[in-house]
Structure formats: structure tokens, C-alpha cells
Amino acid sequence: MSTQQFILVGPPGSGVRAQAAALAERWHIPHVSMGKLVREAIANASAIGVEAAQILALVTDPNQKVTALDFAATQAWIDQSPLDQYQTVHFATHGMVDNERPQFSGLVLSRFDANRQPLEDFYLSLNEIFNLNLNAKLVVLSACETGMGDNVRGEGIIGMARGFMYAGAERIVSSLWKVSDPATAELMTQFYTAMLNEGATPAQALQEAQRAMWQAGKLPYYWAAFTLQGEWR
């Protein structure tokens, strides 16, 4: 199995307004909610590039990472990529959670291709997540509320984290509430520094990153949202 770091970043900074509008149309989101959706998409996109750059800088060997940035972060790219060859899969994007209709939960990808042409499929839905073929030791979902889902009696929480685990991931790092993008970039940089430079396990690295932010005076809101599920060793 490959030890490459796979970083998926999307949507790109440009076009997020059209992207949010397309999502609203697909999900029949009321017009009154559109402004909030657009603001969240724009704010999230502005911080994605910072987070990606900081993480990629820690993986110094170019042969040990594959990136799909901005307009390359498409559904077609995911469908054509051998995801089962990567030990670490990192999504830095906009997450959408619908607890009443969990099948509509998922991760937003690029709405446009490299030629800036609109794409029909720009959303990695929960059903598609369940059908991915992974062999990853770690999947990081660096987006809002990716650890949430519908609590089904007899089944537990059905959401993105469950989907990625079903698809073959050993561990999932996900968030429990809407996170601050600059704080998330800082946390993820600390997290990967501990793992890649210091040899910490994912559980140890997350603990160290959160402790560092706490010791720096950051309130728990900025770092406590992220949790690790699955294999803790």
C-alpha cells in the first residue's frame, strides 16, 4: 500500500456563489436561507487554500502526495483515482449535513472543471461515500459538522464518518459543530506536524494539537469540535 498523502481541496475560491446557488436549487432550500449558504461557502473557500498550503508544506517529498486543488477537485477525479492506494485521505472543503434527510449530507466538490465549465455532478453524497473503495489508515474531514448524522434506533449515528468507515477507513477525524476556518487551519497544521514530523499516532497527534491550542489560550470552541473515531492505537 502507498504511503502517499492525498489532499483534496474544493470548492475553489471563485465560483462559490454559483456553487451555493446550485446546491440550494438541488435541495430546494428556501430563498431566505440562500444568503447564509452563500456567506458560509465564501468564508469557507477563503480559508481552504491556507489550510492546504500549510499541510502540503509538511509533506516534503513530492512523490509522497497527490493533490486535487481548486478546479481539479471534481467528482470525476474521485471516480478515476485509486483511492485505495492511499494511507491518508484529507478533505478540506465545505460539508453539508441534513439530519432530517441524511442521504443529502455530503462534501461539496468543484462546481466547475479546469476550463471553468459548469459540472452536473459536484457533490460527494453520503450514498457515494458508502460506496467508495478505501484502504486508508486515516480519513480527515476538515469541514463543518462532518461527525454529525441521523441517530437511527438499532443502527447508531448514520453520517459521513460512518460512511467513510464503511468504505474501508480505519480512523476518521471529523467535527461536531461549525468550526472556525482559521482555527481549523491552525489545528490541522499542528495535527500533521505531530504525525509527520514527530511520529505521533493520529490519536496522539489530535490530542497534542488540541492541547497546544488550549495552552495558547484558545477557547474550546476553536479546537474541541474535532474528534477521532475508529482505531485509536
Image (cartoon, rainbow, N blue to C red):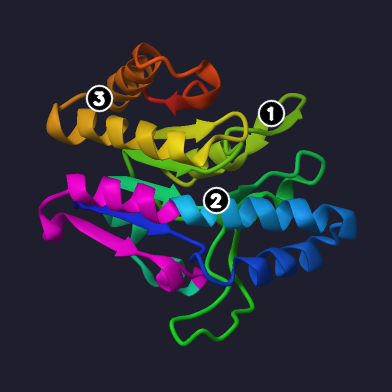
> Which range is magenta?
48-75
Where does the C terminus fall, quadrant-wise?
Answer: top left
Is 72 inside the magenta-drawn segment?
yes
Question: Element type at marker 1?
Answer: loop
Residue 85 rendering spot, x and y as whole percentages: 27, 55
Q: In this view, does 130 lie to the left or right of 182?
A: right
Is 10 inside the magenta-drawn segment?
no
- Residue highlighted by disc 2: 44
Question: What is the distance, in whole Å, between disc 3 and disc 1 at their CAs?
Answer: 29 Å
Q: Which of marks 3 and 1 is nearer the N terminus?
A: 1
For residue 113, say whether it is visible. Answer: yes
Quarter of the view holding residue 87: top left
Residues marked 2 and 1 touching at CB (< 8 Å): no
- Residue highlighted by disc 1: 155
Residue 172 versus residue 13 in the image, above or below:
above
Query: Magenta region's main secondary structure?
Result: helix
Question: What is the distance, in whole Å, between disc 2 and disc 1 at their CAs?
Answer: 32 Å
Q: Label 2 sits on what residue type?
A: Asn
Q: In this view, does 8 lie to the left or right of 111?
A: left
Name the residue at 12% across, 51% down.
Answer: 60
Q: How crowded is mark 2: few (under 14 residues within 10 Å), some or many (20 or more)?
A: many
Question: Element type at marker 3?
Answer: loop
Q: Which one is closest to the eye, mark 3 or mark 2?
A: 2
Q: Label 3 sits on what residue type?
A: Thr
Question: Element type at marker 2?
Answer: helix
Residue 143 rendering spot, x and y as whole percentages: 53, 43
